[in-house]
Image (cartoon, grey):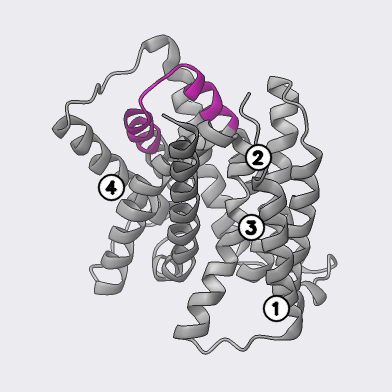
Amino acid sequence: MSAGEQKTQVAFLYAAIVLIWGSTWAVIPYQLGDVAEELSIAYRFALGSVVLFIYAAATGRRLRIPLAYYPMIVITGSLMFSLNYLFTYLAVNYVTSGLVAVVFSLLVISNAFFERLFFRTPVDRRLMFGSLFGIIGIACLFWPEVETLSLQDRSFWGVLLTVTAVILASLGNMGAIVNNSRNLPVVTVNAHGMAWGALMSVVIASIRGQEFVFPMTAEYVVSLLYLAIVGSSLVFGFYLVLLRSIGSARAAYTSVLFPLVALLLSTFLENYQWSYLAVAGVVSILTGNWLALTKIRRK
């Protein structure tokens, strides 16, 4: 693949990930309420896994993974497709989704830290500077929610749960780096990983004594199909390819842009009113995005 083709591929993957995961913010609320968080997560990734296994079989891809590599698949799947989502969903019970987005944007820095810790990857100052712009921009977008934050009440637990989700997601990214280094097929890795993530969520639901229900409503079923097929099977494949191309820290910068997409959708669907501070936040996010993604050196 030529340098120009690689840049085009990276741009496509990056845009697709941001748009798809940004849109899931509007869909996830339909999964919560009547069904326990861990069960909605289990349904989502179990269906996503089945879709990927069918696709892999239909296209002649290898379905088996060498036994020596399998423990990392289990760990990565449990972190990426179960535990980090569970802590994120639980956090929304304590703080607003906007505040969760602000804290979750720390994933960029967390990934850079763990890459340095586990793989001795040098910390890119340009990336860190861009990440700072991104985090400030997210805080500006959701300033009314940030301004009311008080660590003396339930907000403390919401922030703590979100930070835990960030760490778990970041560790899952590190597992994905290991799997990528072993040249394992992305579709097969995700199929097995999502299956283990779904199983982990079912185990947690059983331990917590959750009632196993499945609402046969149009809202729940349609939102589940979108999250499982588009928001999981498709986009996680894109994400792992992007991670392999530009590194986990830069790939994680997509998490800074998700809320921006969600707000743009809210502008058209829910008449979201933009403020000068929100516009300044968008400018800051885009500036950080430019700093983080330009002058990428492939090592």
Q: Secondary structure at mark 3?
A: helix
Give the labeled residue for mark 1: 279
Where is residue 180? Give x, y as percent: 48, 24
Q: What amino acid type is highlighted by mark number 2?
A: Ala
Q: Nearer the viewer, mark 4 or mark 3?
A: 3
Where is residue 206? Give x, y as percent: 42, 45
Q: Nearer the viewer, mark 3 or mark 1?
A: 1
Q: Nearer the viewer, mark 2 or mark 4?
A: 2
Q: Is residue 89 visible?
A: yes
Q: Secondary structure at mark 1?
A: helix
Q: Which residues are magenta?
A: 174-195
Vertical comparison of 249 with 181: above or below? below
Vertical comparison of 13 with 223: above or below? above
Give the labeled residue for mark 3: 256
Distance CA(mark 3)–CA(mark 1): 15 Å
The disc, 3 or 1, on the residue closer to the chain's N-terminal end is 3
Give the labeled residue for mark 2: 249
* Mark 2 Cα-neighbour bin, 10 Å: few <14, some 14–19, many ≥20: many
> Residue 152 vs residue 48: left or right?
right
Q: Quadrant of the N terminus?
A: top left
Distance CA(mark 3)–CA(mark 2): 12 Å
Where is residue 9? Give x, y as percent: 43, 42
The disc, 2 or 1, on the residue closer to the chain's N-terminal end is 2
Q: Is residue 106 visible?
A: no
**C-beta proximity under 8 Å, tags 1 and 4:** no
* Mark 4 Cα-neighbour bin, 10 Å: few <14, some 14–19, many ≥20: many
Q: Quadrant of the C terminus?
A: top right
Q: Residue at x 50, y 33 (%)?
A: 3
Q: What amino acid type is highlighted by mark number 1?
A: Val
